[in-house]
């Protein structure tokens, strides 16, 4: 019997049968079909999710490519708008400069006229003062040369004073 037990113990057939029985018991408890279905569903979900992400990425890539195609046109428009704006600003600055120049010219002309008027008044004052001084000097000189004129002028001044009523 010991021999039979040793033969059975070391026999590959018995070991194989024990392994098969053990697998059957384990597989009945585990429900391998359900595990494979679950794994298959998980893999299917991951693949679908990957497909969706790939499609979204492709759509975004297409959108980005479209934007890149429009980029030169947009840049051209931006540059064109900037040039137009610069021209308008330049014209505005030029117009304001011309307006300011006209104001300055007007003020300068007004100032020149005022200074001319002041100069003419000063010149007239100086001329009249010089004329009065010259006339006075002439009268004094004539009176020195001819003392009889002195009496005549005094008589005329007194008669003028008499005519004035106070």
Image (cartoon, grey):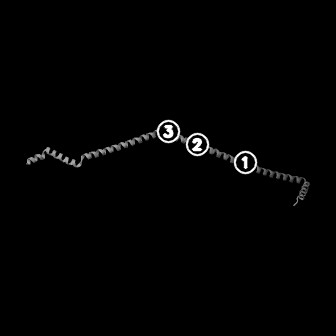
Residue where numbered disc 3 is placed: 73
Q: Residue at x 41, y 41 (%)?
A: 59
Label 3 vs 2, first from the N-terminus: 3
Crowd tier of the residue under label 2, counting other residues whose Cα lies within 10 Å: few below 14, some 14–19, many 20 or above: few
Q: Position of residue 25 (x, y in %)?
A: 19, 48
Q: Is residue 149 left or right of residue 48?
A: right
The residue depicted at 80 percent of the width and 51 percent of the height is 128
Q: Nearer the viewer, mark 2 or mark 1?
A: 2
Q: Disc 2 marks which residue?
A: 88
Point out which mark residue 47 bears.
Answer: none
**Of 135 and 99, which appears nearest the observer?**
99
Packing grade of label 3 (10 A; few <14, some 14-19, many >=20) is few
Q: Is residue 153 found left or right of 95 in the rendered image?
A: right
Say what secondary structure mark 1 lies in.
Answer: helix
Where is residue 56 shown, x and y percent of the image?
39, 43
Instruction: Give the secondary structure at mark 2.
Output: helix
Quickly name the residue at label 1.
113
């Amino acid at each position: 019997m010991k021999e039979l037990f040793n033969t059975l113990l070391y026999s590959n057939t018995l070991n194989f049968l024990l392994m098969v029985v053990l697998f059957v018991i384990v597989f009945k408890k585990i429900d391998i079909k359900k595990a494979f279905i679950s794994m298959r569903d998980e893999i299917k979900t991951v693949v679908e999710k990957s497909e969706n992400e790939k499609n979204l990425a492709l759509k975004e890539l297409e959108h980005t490519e479209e934007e890149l195609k429009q980029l030169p046109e947009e840049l051209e428009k931006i540059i064109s708008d900037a040039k137009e704006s610069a021209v308008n600003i330049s014209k505005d600055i030029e117009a304001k400069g011309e307006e300011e120049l006209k104001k300055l010219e007007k003020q300068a002309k007004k100032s020149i006229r005022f200074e001319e008027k002041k100069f003419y008044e000063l010149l007239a004052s100086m001329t009249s003062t010089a004329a009065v001084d010259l006339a006075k000097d002439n009268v004094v000189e004539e009176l020195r040369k001819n003392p009889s004129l002195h009496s005549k002028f005094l008589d005329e001044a007194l008669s003028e004073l008499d005519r004035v009523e106070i």
